[in-house]
Amino acid sequence: MLKQNTLAKSFSMQGKGLHTGLNINITFHPAPDNHGYKIKRVDLEDQPIIDALAENVVNTQRGTVVAKKDVQVSTIEHAMAALYASGIDNCLIEVDAPEFPILDGSSRFFIEEINKAGITEQNTPKDFYIVKHKIEVADEQTGSSLIILPDDKFSINVLISFDSPVLNNQYATLNDISEFATEMAASRTFVFVREVEALLNNNLIKGGDLDNAIVIYDKEMPEEVLKNLANGLNIPYKSIRSLGYINNQPLVYDNEPARHKLIDVIGDIALIGKPVRGRIIATRPGHKINNQLARLIRKDIKQNEVQAPVYDPNTPPVMDVNRIKELLPHRYPFLLVDKIIDTGSNYIVGIKNITVNEPFFQGHFPQEPVMPGVLLVEAMAQTGGLLVLNSVDEPERYSTYFMKIDQVKFRQKVVPGDTIILRIELTSPIRRGIATMKGYVFVGEKLVVEAELMAQIVKNK
């Protein structure tokens, strides 16, 4: 079972802001389970905290900007990508300015400091967003599109395309998030010289220079104009004799711009608040369309607060019915779990196939067979009993007795032909033989029943 990760200890960094040019201090702190990413503006008197979530993005011009009311923080995407790629789910970030430091325009320094600080597991299991079907966003005007498809892990393909003799078409691929630190993190942001004047006029790159961004000269300009741009950025003028890249430092990768766009996609997708299991195919991505996809996913998460477990009938069960009968005393017609398909230290997933031959359908109801709600709760209880028994040595010597069932909600009827998927998870560690659990019953992708349960485990055999 994958558990949530958090920082092992706090670390701080300093750097110049891309937009303001100011010196900025930023500190990353460990945070409790299910805290998510939160940003605290410590330079303001009331120190407001902003949730780093897609719906809080208010601007995507030259960087992702999140806000709470009138308080905002910009250029967060490179740090978010580093946290996401490092498997960190919970973090409190303190910053003393309205933006994150640009550093060298990449995620490299964030990754390096995270590796120095280390990360540690938390008790809560990772709550993935599992892509079950194709989701797509597109912008006909720009030709941009993002598609996310089902996959058993997170991966991403990026294609960028510009009307430029220097930077035309490039692509980058990340097949495994574990490769981010070595293959992607050092990729810097990029800008075209022909865009610099407009960006300066809009106060967007006051802190830019030839070290913290890739600068692309792809259209000849008078020397006087170039000198004025250098003065506007407060950097020494550098004579340009031909089209190409004019950085002080050479490219880290031949396709560094495409790799940086891949970093941006990861940083923006991190704002859904959960790690993703799916493949993203991004064509001409940008912060605006990245955020559109993230918002769609956030909407899906809100509508389906708990995702149905993945059920593949071809996968051998963790426990078949014979093993279940060794652990549970129930027998026909009251054994309501057919098999267990997944289990961990604090959760279990069971399956029950509902057929018209179930004896209760003779009276409930002959003309409209519906599975009784109390039996759906009983199926949850039996699955929860298997979870509790899985936590002890010699489980055959124990029995579980349910003490309380609370907050039961029936959302949809269960009928013959349905296959119910039962997910039960501990809401706190088992203490003195008492287990508190949350149970969910799904038919397909739909949540049909949920309840809170309390059980006692007793050694009596």
Image (spheres, rainbow, N blue to C red):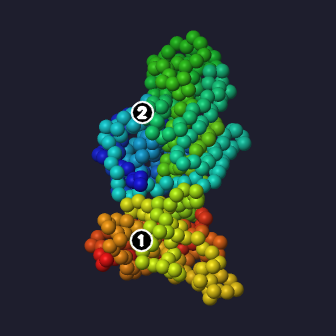
In the picture shown, does residue 295 fall above or below 433? above
In the picture shown, does residue 276 fall above or below 311? above
Quadrant location, the N terminus: bottom left
Which of 414/247 is in front? 414
* Kind of residue indicated by mark 1: Glu
Q: Is label 2 or label 1 in front?
A: 1
Q: For the point 32% across and 67% down, which residue is it?
A: 394
How dense is the environment of label 1, judged by Cα within 10 Å: few (below 14), some, or many (20 and up)? few
Label 1 residue SS: helix
Residue 246 location (% of width, % of height)? 52, 18
Quadrant location, the C terminus: bottom left
Task: Find residue 111 and name its label.
Answer: none
Q: For the point 56% across and 60% down, which residue is it?
A: 311
Residue 332 location (% of width, % of height)? 51, 80
Q: CA distance from mark 2 to mark 1?
A: 53 Å
Name the residue that disc number 1 marks.
326
